[in-house]
Image: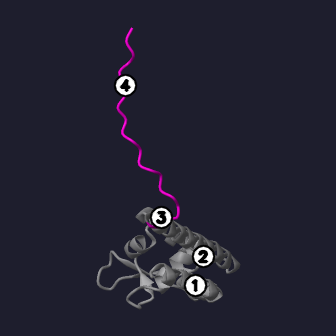
Amino acid sequence: MSAPPARHTSPRPPARRASEPRHAAALDDVIQAAELRASLRRFARESEQIAAEHGLTAQRYLLLLMIKGAPDGSERSTVTELTGRLQLAQHTVTELVSRAVRAGLIERERSREDRRVSHLRLTDEGTRRLMGAFRGHRVEREALRKVLDSASR
């Protein structure tokens, strides 16, 4: 009997050591990304706690914030605009809005230009709760801003 044919294998390249520059750069990027994600998670968790102290869920806090902080400075928004800003499905935003209206935090106002459109605006109670949570969140926003600034360098 003859021996089985020899397998032709190409030699493996030597394993990179962690101290080599290419790997180190990639590892630094991974560490920075992990730090950023940890900071974002801390921010979200603290935001949830602060919102709860003011009688708001995290989603309701974001809803009120996006209405009050409309990019055009009008302090109002539509469901369609909120869908884009919150990155949620329209039916989800519609339900969030309906619950916030029932809770007395926002009100609907028909558009004068297009009667099919309703603009959403915070009530006095909605503004009171949002601004209480917003002021309580200042330190966390500043900390996150520092992390984002260092990540962009």
In the rendered structure, the answer to whether residue 53 lies left or right of residue 14 reads: right
Bin the neighbour count of mark 2 within 10 Å (Cα to Cα): few under 14, some 14-19, many 20 and up.
some
Residue at 70 percent across and 79 percent down: it is 53
Bin the neighbour count of mark 3 within 10 Å (Cα to Cα): few under 14, some 14-19, many 20 and up.
few
Bin the neighbour count of mark 1 within 10 Å (Cα to Cα): few under 14, some 14-19, many 20 and up.
some
Pick whichever of labels 1 and 2 is earlier in the sequence.
Answer: 2
State the quadrant of the N terminus.
top left
Residue wearing tag 1: 141
Pick whichever of labels 2 and 4 is earlier in the sequence.
Answer: 4
**Mark 3 vs mark 1: in front:** 3
* Real-space Cα separation, disc 2 to disc 4, in angstroms: 60 Å
* Real-space Cα separation, disc 2 to disc 3, in angstroms: 34 Å
The number of callouts visible is 4
Residue at the extreme front: 2
* Real-space Cα separation, disc 3 to disc 1, in angstroms: 37 Å
Q: Is residue 1 visible?
A: yes
Q: Is residue 106 one of those drawn in magenta?
A: no
